Amino acid sequence: MIRFNVFGRFLVGIEWRADAWKTYILGNEGKRRDADFIVPPDVSEEEIGPYLAVLFHESATPERRQVLRLE
């Protein structure tokens, strides 16, 4: 699973399943729930971070301006 910190507001997990990206909102306690957004299947793994930045740009602040891929 690929994990992203989206502007310091929430954590997103994304994985490739059955020819589509499956998206989750990740909780601090290790739980996950289905996210209410999609990543189109033609978005490559390298493009997911920039895609999330465009999708959630309204969540950005001057102090929190990045979507960070977590290792």
Image (cartoon, rainbow, N blue to C red):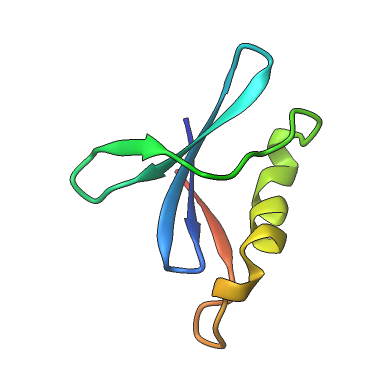
Q: Nearer the viewer, residue 66 or 31?
A: 31
Q: Residue at x 74, y 44 (%)?
A: 47
Q: Nearer the viewer, residue 53 or 69?
A: 53
Residue at the farthest right position: 42
Q: Residue at x 57, y 61 (%)?
A: 67
The quarter of the picture where residue 18 lies is top right
Looking at the image, how many numbered discs can be counted on the residues?
A: 0
Q: Residue 17, how many percent across, how many down?
A: 57, 16
Residue at the farthest bottom position: 62
Q: Height in image: 45 above or below 57? A: above
The quarter of the picture where residue 19 lies is top right
Q: Residue at x 76, y 34 (%)?
A: 44
Q: Residue 36, how many percent across, how many down?
A: 52, 44
Q: Residue 53, how many percent across, how many down?
A: 66, 61
Residue at the farthest top position: 18
Q: Residue 46, how many percent across, how many down?
A: 72, 41
Q: Height in image: 15 above or below 8? A: above
Figure quadrant of the C terminus: top left
In the picture, measured across the screen, residue 42 lies left or right of residue 59, that is right
In the picture, measured across the screen, residue 7 lies left or right of residue 39, that is left
In the picture, measured across the screen, residue 20 lies left or right of residue 12, that is right
The quarter of the picture where residue 29 lies is top left
Q: Height in image: 30 above or below 61? A: above
